[in-house]
Image (cartoon, rainbow, N blue to C red):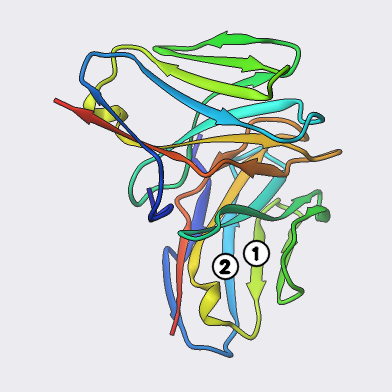
Amino acid sequence: KAGVTQTPRYLIKTRGQQVTLSCSPISGHRSVSWYQQTPGQGLQFLFEYFSETQRNKGNFPGRFSGRQFSNSRSEMNVSTLELGDSALYLCASSQGAGDTQYFGPGTRLTVL
Amino acid sequence: GESVGLHLPTLSVQEGDNSIINCAYSNSASDYFIWYKQESGKGPQFIIDIRSNMDKRQGQRVTVLLNKTVKHLSLQIAATQPGDSAVYFCAENRGNAGNMLTFGGGTRLMVKP
């Protein structure tokens, strides 16, 4: 089976812009979770989608949003980018609740 | 890993020795715990997991121990190899009905040849 894929792998944006990141889960996995990884805060949970519905949400501002499509692919969007949004954004997929989450390689976002 | 912290705890071991990486968790309600390995430029890679109804689980060269009394988790790697060099994270699942991992700060394992 192919693993979790994320596109793009690298992205450079400027402050105030918006960005959309994409994640394709492992075939058959219906849960997709997003995490932000920074040197200062480590790995932090953003949100989880299951069957096109947001099931859990972390403590991030409303500028961070996401969605899931009927084929379980997911996108996350960050609007009005700030310098502090520079991070590695990781997507993980699992079959269902409480199952092992498998991570993709991440999208490295740099905000200038 | 991907720059996971300037002050990341580091464990340095000799090749062939056993490694023990420790982790404390905070939520008594967490019922699922996972160890991940992250190499530079890659996403976290699943190593081993354990549920709260167990106190020990073994995999290939790895063992996870769970002590619910003191909320402590450890990862033991037998016969550590240079390829084991990476950052290791413990994570707990707190999702009421889903997947919402809370990660520890990570430990950098360096294996000396």
Residue in the image at 67% along x and 50% along y: A33
Q: Tell me whether marks 2 and 1 sit on the same chain.
A: yes
Q: Does B68 appear above or below A105?
A: above
Residue in the image at 61% along x and 54% along y: A35
Q: CA distance from mark 2 to mark 1?
A: 5 Å
Kindly state the secondary structure of the residue where label 1 is placed: strand
Q: Are marks 2 and 1 in contact (CB under 8 Å)?
A: yes
x then y, percent, for residue A22: 58, 63
Residue in the image at 49% along x and 40% along y: A2
Q: Is residue B36 left or right of residue B19?
A: right
Residue A17 picture quarter: bottom right
In the rendered structure, which amino acid carries the disc numbered 1?
Glu
Query: Which chain is disc 1 placed on?
Result: A
Q: Which mark, residue A21?
A: 2
- Residue under pointer 1: A75
In the rendered structure, which amino acid carries the disc numbered 2?
Leu
Local crowd size for mark 2, using a 10 Å CA cut-off: few (<14), some (14–19), many (≥20): many
Q: Is residue A93 left or right of residue A40?
A: right
Q: Quadrant of the C terminus of chain B?
A: top left
Local crowd size for mark 1, using a 10 Å CA cut-off: few (<14), some (14–19), many (≥20): many
Among numbered discs 2 and 1, the one appearing first in the sequence: 2
